[in-house]
Image (cartoon, rainbow, N blue to C red):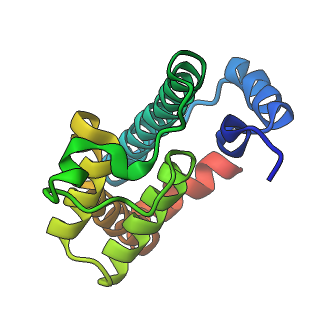
Amino acid sequence: GGSSPKAKLLFSSTVAQKLRSLDEAYNLFHVNNNWYIFLRLHQILCLRLLRIYSQAERQIEEDSREREWEREVLGVKREKSDSPAIQLRLKDPMDIEVEDYYPAFLDMVRNLLDGNMDSSQYEDSLRDMFTIHAYIAFTMDKLIQSIVRQLQHIVSDEICVQVTELYLS
């Protein structure tokens, strides 16, 4: 539509402002190993998602600058099929627009976890979208599976439940 490409990707500023005010909050939570491992894996997941998100933003900005330069300097509009690799039929053109890389990435992770996509296809698609920066997301399925396993330990282990109740009281 009429919104800018970057607007699709940006978080609401009001949500970000609310979260920023929580940075000053401090809570002490004494935990056992199961909780610690879960929290650490969660942090790794958040960092990886942020890095892929940031890379998608950079690629949107870069693509926008390239298109503007081509329009101003060359007076032409670039097509997807203009890539030499695509013209030599070494690579198929991607159906995904740069603005949709991050949502497509999330869908691919879901499909990988659901078994609707195999890992080699997942990695190839990531490489096509995020080039050399894709490696950070190659083991996303293993990370999420480990997080789920830790959550199962947390809800089934009596000590974990007691630690949680102590924190909440």
Give the left or right position of residue 57, taking residue 87 as reference: right
Residue at the spot x=59%, y=24% of the render?
68
Along the line of sight, the residue nearer the viewer: 114 or 58: 58
Residue at the spot x=56%, y=55% of the render?
164
Residue at the spot x=47%, y=39% of the render?
78
Give the left or right position of residue 3, taking residue 96 as reference: right
Residue at the spot x=48%, y=36% of the render?
50
The spot of residue 26 in percent (x, y) is: 66, 24
In this view, the residue farthest toward the front is 75
Along the line of sight, the residue nearer the viewer: 19 or 27: 19
The spot of residue 36 in percent (x, y) is: 36, 44
Q: Quadrant of residue 134?
A: top left
Give the left or right position of residue 65, taking residue 129 as reference: right
The spot of residue 79 in percent (x, y) is: 45, 47
| Res 38 seen here | no
- Vertical side of 94 occupied by 21: above or below: above
- Vertical side of 97 occupied by 48: above or below: above
| Res 5 seen here | yes
Along the line of sight, the residue nearer the viewer: 116 or 89: 89
Q: How many marks?
A: 0
The spot of residue 117 in percent (x, y) is: 28, 78
